[in-house]
Image: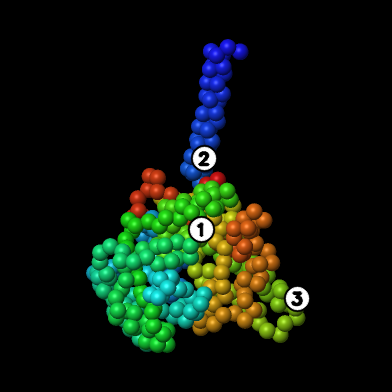
Amino acid sequence: MDSRQKIACAGVIMGLGLVMVARKVWARRARNKPSGVWKQVGTVTQLNLYPVKSCRGIPLNECRISSIGMENIPEDGCMALGDRRMVIYKSDSLEMISARTYCHMLQIRVFSRSEDEISLTFDSHLLKVKIPQGKADRKIRLWTEQVPLIDAGDEAAEWLQKYVFDGKPNFRLGFWPGVEVRRDISHLVKKYEQVYPFMRNDFTGAFSDLSSFLLLNESSVEDLNDKIAQKSQDQDSNEDPAVVSIDNFRGNFVIRGPSAYEEDNWSWVRIGDRVVFRNYKPCTRCSLTTIDKETSIKNKHFEPLTTLKTYRLLDEKKRKLDPSPAMGIYMGLWTDGQTNDEIIRVGDPVYVCE
């Protein structure tokens, strides 16, 4: 083979390689765009907003959708509260804390008071907080990430110390710097991309563990409760079986209609006429699900995790990354052709497109 033939052969091989790469890129882009027919599978029965990470949620009748999570639609003269836009952290270790360790955090409630002020309550104790302005003034550790925040000031820290944490110091309140600020989870994307290829930075929320939206299916939780009751019956227990509230799973969207765990297999979800989400990962569950939000007491049988571990562990490949059982799906807002000012209401239809 002379030199011209070698060059021509190399060109053909290179061209075939480029075609194969282009096909893979095209196929990936095609999978990352909804196509086909939308089919209604259910309706929205609950909308839940959690303004402070690991604290009490707020049930809503309607919400506004932003790229980093839902917001309430406030009364005139009040600011909107966003999902997990606030966090309690330790100033000595600069890491977030959660109700996994401090169960009584679930009794902290948040209210919007004006355009620049909110209030927090714990038992009968009230704190008024002016919303801090400006850029992030520090970073804290959120699991494996360093995330920015704006500190709420010493008055909030003193209130937390005195009323919530029994005089213990170093607990402070932080705010997310703004909707335009995004987290960088590229290290996690690289870690998970082999099993969760549609995970990406702009599907994250503010201080939420990973995702900007979490969807729960009523039928899945009902099936879980049936299994807990059956186990109690099989063990001939004299105790009433522990009925697990769907609130224990702290979902933003609760839907009714699909069969149990049908949500595991969805790719695209549309709520109402316009708001489209990408299902990109199951939500693996932690000990927070075992805490009664009304009493802040952990279930003595460690339910629902004990039962979930018997049948809701992921497959072997995924379990190496996520060893905990799953309930619910993580979704990101698919923004192509959408705005960040859409409204979702209780009663809206839910569609899927495969």
Say which residue label 3 marks: 234
162 w.r.t. 286: above or below? below
Which quadrant would the N terminus be assigned to in this image?
top right
Extreme residue toward the front, this view: 3
Q: Earlier in the sequence, mark 2 or mark 3?
A: 2
Q: Is residue 267 visible?
A: no
Give left or right: position of 68 versus 5.
left
Residue at the location (56% across, 69% down)?
Answer: 286
- The three-letter code of the residue at mark 1 reads Tyr
Give residue 64's position: percent from left, percent from top. Answer: 36, 60
Instruction: Please tell me the numbered disc located at residue 93.
Output: none
x and y percent of residue 177 in the render?
32, 63
Quote the CA–CA distance across marks 1 and 2: 20 Å
Q: Residue at x 37, y 65 (%)?
A: 139
Residue 348 percent location from the top left of the image: 45, 58
Front residue of 180/279: it is 180
Residue 244 appearing in the image: yes
> Which structural element holds mark 3?
helix
User: At 56% across and 80% down in the image, what residue appears?
Assistant: 298
Q: Amino acid at mark 2?
A: Arg
Q: Label 1: which residue?
A: 330
Place residue 303 in its image quadrant: bottom right
For marks 1 and 2 on the same chain, the one whose residue lies earlier in the sequence: 2
Q: Categorize mark 1 by other alpha carbons within 10 Å: few (<14), some (14-19), many (20+).
A: many
Res 28 label: 2
- Measuring 55% from the left and 61% from the top, which residue is drawn there? 283
